[in-house]
Image (tube, rainbow, N blue to C red):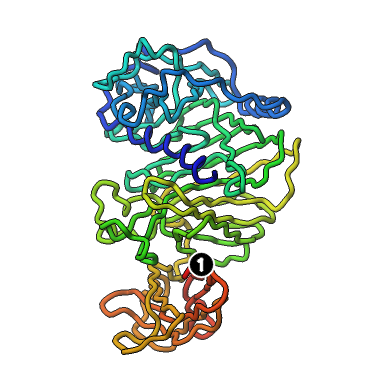
Amino acid sequence: MLSFDRRGVLAALVASWGASSSRALAATSGLTSSALRLGPAHAFAFDLLTTQAKQLAARPYQPPPPPAAALTGIDFDKVQKIRFRPGEALWLGADMPYPISFFHLNRYSQVPVKIFALDGPADKMTAREIVYSADYFEYGDSGLDPAALGPLGYSGFRANNAQNNQNDWLAFQGASYFRTDGQDNQYGASARGIAIDTALPKPEEFPRFTQFWLAEQDQTLTIYALLDGPTLSGAYRFDCRRQDGVVMDVHCDLFFRGQPGRLGVAPLTSMYWYGENQRDHAPDWRPEIHDSDGLSLWNGKGERIWRPLINPPAVQVNAFADQAPKGFGLIQRDRDFADYQDDGAFYNKRPGIWVEPKGDWGQGAVELVEIPTNDEIHDNIVAYWRPAQSIKPGNVLSFDYRLYWQDEEPNYPADLAKVVATRIGRAGVPGAETWPANARKFALDFEGGDLAEMEPRYDIKPVVTSSSGEASGAYVIKIVGTSRWRALFDVPLGGKMPVELRCFLQLGDKTLTETWIYQYFA
């Protein structure tokens, strides 16, 4: 039930985001085009939004009305043929940096959201609803008759870059999902407003953003959003800037009408099918297929940790207990096209997402959920912060954090090397006629930090621990002709599975690398 429900929601995102327009935007003067109709103006402030969320949570949850029957016929192929007319974008030609266009409802995204345009200074903002019209869309050869669809609404929105008329760089659509194209103009992993009951033996709950309010000022797109679901309601603010990729400052106030079985704050969602660490999972001709290849952690004690992702035999939830975390994220470290050979999906360009908490988030854990998959169309990886405190109806929680959509983690220590590859194979000495039974060899590549400037030497030691027994044959070499260093060791596999592993490199008393941790299934 877990994977079915999750994949049903994520199918909507794949279908609709794939239809993002790549057409040039036509020049228009004024706040909006003449055809874009707005509702009457009313006052808006974040305090009013917070009050609305609080009042909503004090009442029983009201699910959205049944979707229009006509939407069931708008399948994946038809979604790709429906285009928002570029000349109808909000703020196009109005000296605003990011014109806004809108997503059509379809079989996969059936519930409309209300979207408002904001105007005026921060202390006296007014909001006007952007009224839906089928006239804003081109239906091409989809075979759809817009008149027969009836009054619908929007399923979400996206922000475009007006300066060079390129593709959209940010999109909000589907439950509380959103994503950006990072530094290399390529969508990949996604973020969410909140996660409820992920990887529990019951269906996951997907609270949804029901209303959005949009404003732009000083190269910043500000998005206010109202969240609602059976367990909670929430008021959100996102300040989004294109800055070495995309940076978002997020604030949320959460009001609980129910008790979540598992609360996930600042959740991230990605896809991992296989990489160099799981060659036995590679039925496709491409060497690797993943949006992210690892979970990066910076814990409250200051330790940097790298956990390569895996495609597990069953749903796995790993919790990394912490106090006042400094950051975590799903990162795509391998950015070499040769390791993917995909000139359509461009997995080597997929952005990483890093969560930087603001203030003290107290006790809790970063949790990593890995769900088995046999294809690249399923987002099967989730990471989030789970507070340790017990949450009951009537509780209120607030969080502030910054999201970095970039190739690498920000503020990484200059003297510390990173893990850049994890490989696993037969234990023992290559070329030997016999090799140890019930053991595996691990080869870890490290790059950067102080190691990058070192000449080959033999006093750098791998510090290895294993839940299955003592590692053997451990040593470190510098890879000829590169700045990389490689640690190799054999691990016995007898006993309980999976095997839990840790490794870092040390010179005397000095730690040279982040800590690699791994969960190996024989």
The picture places residue 487, in percent across and down from the top left corner, at 41, 79
Quarter assignment of residue 459: bottom left
Drawn side of residue 370 relative to residue 428, left or right: right
Q: Residue at x 62, y 26 (%)?
A: 49
| Closest to the observer, 493 or 104 | 493
The picture places residue 129, in percent across and down from the top left corner, at 50, 17
Drawn side of residue 244 relative to residue 62, left or right: left
Quarter assignment of residue 210: top right
The residue identified by callout 1 is 519
Drawn side of residue 198 relative to residue 323, left or right: left
Q: Residue at x 33, y 19 (%)?
A: 137
| Closest to the observer, 431 or 446 | 431
Q: Residue at x 41, y 58 (%)?
A: 293
The picture places residue 115, in percent across and down from the top left corner, at 49, 22
| Closest to the observer, 449 or 74 | 74
Residue flagged by tag 1: what amino acid is it? Gln
Can residue 44 be seen here? The reply is yes
